């Protein structure tokens, strides 16, 4: 878990200190967004696919109770053991218990944002269990003792030179070598040894099918399959919203997922796990952790349609310039900003404000979540619940009074113009947040009302 | 109340009014030359394509393309290649770590994304197409479907599987500064043979 006392604006300010890096981060993510566009525009049926995916997900949310029971029944019949976890703590305890039952204290794990959400690695470390993340990007941030900064591209904030230094320190590569090809090969050799020696593997779940009891895991690297097929026990962790009704619906979602995420037509591997190998159990943990509560919030339940493609992050003008860590939560960016306040409104009260409400996120979302509308609604909710800073509340009240009284409005306009013209340093200073990164405007000579009166006379 | 019942009752209380599933039967690929589309897409994602007429031609291509391969496992029947293992008798699957080339059968290919569909019926053990250094896949009878919709329609008619996977190209990563590197944890190359 990412404990931080700083809010998004303060963390973004830290990230913004290195302007060159911010520009690079911004451009890299925009390049991925452009790859997405190029790929998406090849499909004339794209909008119809989004609409179908959205409707399927609405159906899932409206029938989740029965689909979960159907999935449990079918998965159990397939020989998969199903577990239920009400919250992060219970999820972590189940994983630990399963590892103890198999007498395992070293585990390999492929990408699972849910385990980030649950703080699994930290919990298991406290229990004396070593976890190695096998996705290259996740391994890099793990070595750097940082959380992922993006759900699909975990180390998108890191320069290759920094990765070269990490590999030199931990994997014994030569100093000052930063060639991606060379570093990836070093990671391949290092992790191959991990795959061959770990007896337990944990994977995430991209989709689970109620009709058949199978689940699908997507990777480009092949790390989920390498871990799961070589281990004695496979544990899969999934949020309860990952269900889809029928196998044929995978056709819709697999077409949307990677095109939205990275502009690829599909991931290299889309593996369907239905039955365990001989004598090698599969355990699947169905995790709630606040999802059933979110389901009951009429305005916000649509966020549970998310398939974790990351398109909303790549397109977001705020995410691209503030970096994933500024969101201080497992899932960053626009979608994270509407998911996190559900878990802890106080801790994540800043996130719905980390947006320009431009709507680009909603436009690229493959399952048509109204992300920017929800950001706006969360702001209203947070103000209602009293979670906004006192200064903002007072200034908003003052502004409301001023705007509703012509006398006050005139006086305020006059004094504003006077200040900007004669004593600009009163506003052009660091105490005024509006002055940061901006020049204050030149004051007009008179207001519209003054001009209108003069014209009449 | 245990967690299972607690979660289920919270969901029952909170889920919205039932909405219907959309009809997705109208989704299908465009009429086009599927073999050439498949070849274009597979090449773009880093795979190699060979259109061949028979097993002899596959064997000849493999002999030239993989002349360095020492340990070859072939799960494709009647491939006239010398010194290949056609059955994996060693139950210790970790010993597959030195397989240079695995040759396997796929049920079909998908033109829109370059993927092949394999199931554990044809690929035993499951880890084989991941742990090998290079992967060669033979699609019998040149079966290629336009999109994933036709692919799942076909899967519904095939024998049920315990494990199945769409494999599209060699394993890859772009995690270091978005530089594409082929050969992450799985095969460093993928060659697809389509019999025409």
Image (cartoon, helix red, strand yellow):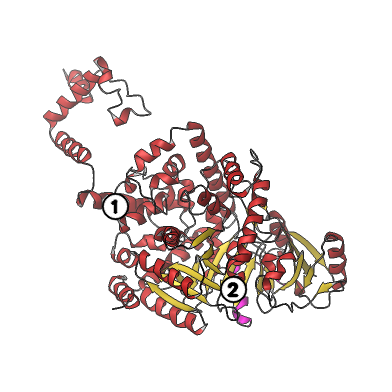
Q: Position of residue A366 (x, y in %)?
A: 48, 58
Left or right of A417: which side holds A292?
right
Left or right of A348: which side holds A175?
right
Disc 1 target residue:
A378
* Up-down relation of residue A103 to residue B32 (above or below): below
Q: Is residue B152 magenta?
A: yes
**How many other residues sit within 10 Å of disc 2, few (<14), some (14-19) or many (≥20)?**
some
Q: Residue at x 61, y 79 (%)?
A: B161
Q: Nearer the viewer, residue A124 or B61?
A: A124
Residue B129 seen: yes
Q: Is residue A248 magenta?
A: no
Left or right of A114: which side holds B60?
right
Secondary-structure class at tag 1: helix
Residue B177 seen: no
Left or right of A42: which side holds B50?
right
Q: Which mark is on residue B83?
A: none
Disc 2 target residue:
B152
Span highlighted in magenta in the image:
B143-159
Q: Position of residue B174 (x, y in %)?
A: 61, 50
Q: Nearer the viewer, residue B191 or A183?
A: A183
């Amino acid at each position: 878990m990412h404990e931080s006392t700083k809010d998004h604006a303060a963390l973004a300010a830290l990230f913004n200190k290195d302007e060159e890096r911010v520009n690079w981060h911004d451009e890299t993510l925009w390049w991925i967004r452009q790859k997405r566009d190029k790929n998406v525009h090849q499909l004339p049926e794209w909008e119809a696919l989004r609409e179908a995916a959205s409707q399927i997900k609405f159906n899932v949310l409206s029938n989740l109770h029965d689909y979960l029971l159907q999935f449990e029944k079918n998965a159990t019949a397939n020989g998969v053991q199903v577990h239920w976890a009400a919250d992060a703590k219970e999820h972590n305890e189940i994983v630990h218990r399963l590892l103890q039952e198999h007498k395992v204290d070293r585990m390999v794990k492929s990408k699972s944002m849910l385990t980030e959400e649950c703080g699994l690695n930290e919990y298991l470390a406290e229990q004396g269990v070593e976890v190695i993340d096998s996705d290259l990007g996740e391994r890099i941030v793990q070595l750097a003792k940082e959380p992922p900064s993006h759900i699909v591209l975990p180390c998108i904030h890191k320069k290759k030179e920094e990765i070269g230094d990490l590999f030199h320190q931990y994997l014994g590569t030569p100093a000052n070598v930063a060639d991606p090809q060379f570093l990836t090969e070093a990671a391949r050799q290092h992790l191959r040894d991990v795959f061959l020696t770990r007896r337990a593997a944990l994977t995430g779940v991209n989709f689970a099918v109620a009709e058949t009891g199978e689940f699908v895991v997507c990777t480009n690297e092949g790390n989920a399959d390498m871990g799961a097929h070589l281990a004695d026990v496979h544990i899969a962790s999934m949020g309860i919203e990952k269900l889809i009704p029928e196998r044929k619906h995978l056709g819709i979602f697999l077409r949307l997922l990677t095109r939205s995420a990275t502009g690829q037509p599909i991931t290299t591997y889309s593996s369907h796990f239905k039955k365990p190998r001989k004598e090698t159990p599969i355990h699947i943990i169905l995790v709630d952790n606040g999802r059933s509560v979110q389901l009951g919030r009429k305005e916000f339940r649509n966020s549970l349609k998310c398939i974790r493609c990351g398109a909303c992050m790549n397109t977001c003008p705020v995410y691209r310039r503030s970096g994933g860590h500024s969101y201080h939560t497992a899932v960053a960016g626009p979608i994270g900003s509407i998911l996190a306040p559900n878990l802890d409104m106080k801790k994540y009260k800043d996130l719905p404000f980390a947006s320009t409400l431009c709507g680009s996120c909603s436009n690229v979302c493959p399952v048509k979540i109204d992300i920017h509308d929800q950001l706006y609604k969360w702001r209203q909710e947070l103000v209602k619940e009293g979670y906004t800073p006192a200064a903002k509340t007072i200034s908003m009240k003052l502004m409301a009074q001023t705007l509703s009284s012509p006398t006050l409005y005139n006086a305020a306009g006059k004094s504003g113009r006077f200040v900007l013209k004669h004593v600009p340093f009163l506003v052009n200073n660091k105490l005024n947040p509006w002055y940061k990164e901006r020049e204050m405007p030149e004051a007009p000579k008179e207001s519209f009302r003054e001009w209108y009166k003069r014209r009449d006379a | 109340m245990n967690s299972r019942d607690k979660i289920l009752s919270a969901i029952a209380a909170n889920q919205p009014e039932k909405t219907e599933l959309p009809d997705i039967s109208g989704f299908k690929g465009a009429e086009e030359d599927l073999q050439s589309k498949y070849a274009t897409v597979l090449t773009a994602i880093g795979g190699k394509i060979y259109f061949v007429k028979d097993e002899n031609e596959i064997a000849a291509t493999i002999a030239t393309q993989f002349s360095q391969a020492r340990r070859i496992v072939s799960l494709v029947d009647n491939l006239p290649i010398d010194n290949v293992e056609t059955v994996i008798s060693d139950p210790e699957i970790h010993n597959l770590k030195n397989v240079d080339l695995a040759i396997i059968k796929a049920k079909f290919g998908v033109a829109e994304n370059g993927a092949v569909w394999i199931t554990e019926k044809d690929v035993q053990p499951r880890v084989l197409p991941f742990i090998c250094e290079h992967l060669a896949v033979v699609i019998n009878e040149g079966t290629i479907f336009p999109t994933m919709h036709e692919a799942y329609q076909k899967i519904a008619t095939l024998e049920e599987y315990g494990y199945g996977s769409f494999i599209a190209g060699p394993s890859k990563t772009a995690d270091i500064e978005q530089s594409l590197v082929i050969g992450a944890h799985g095969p460093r190359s993928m060659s697809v043979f389509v019999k025409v």
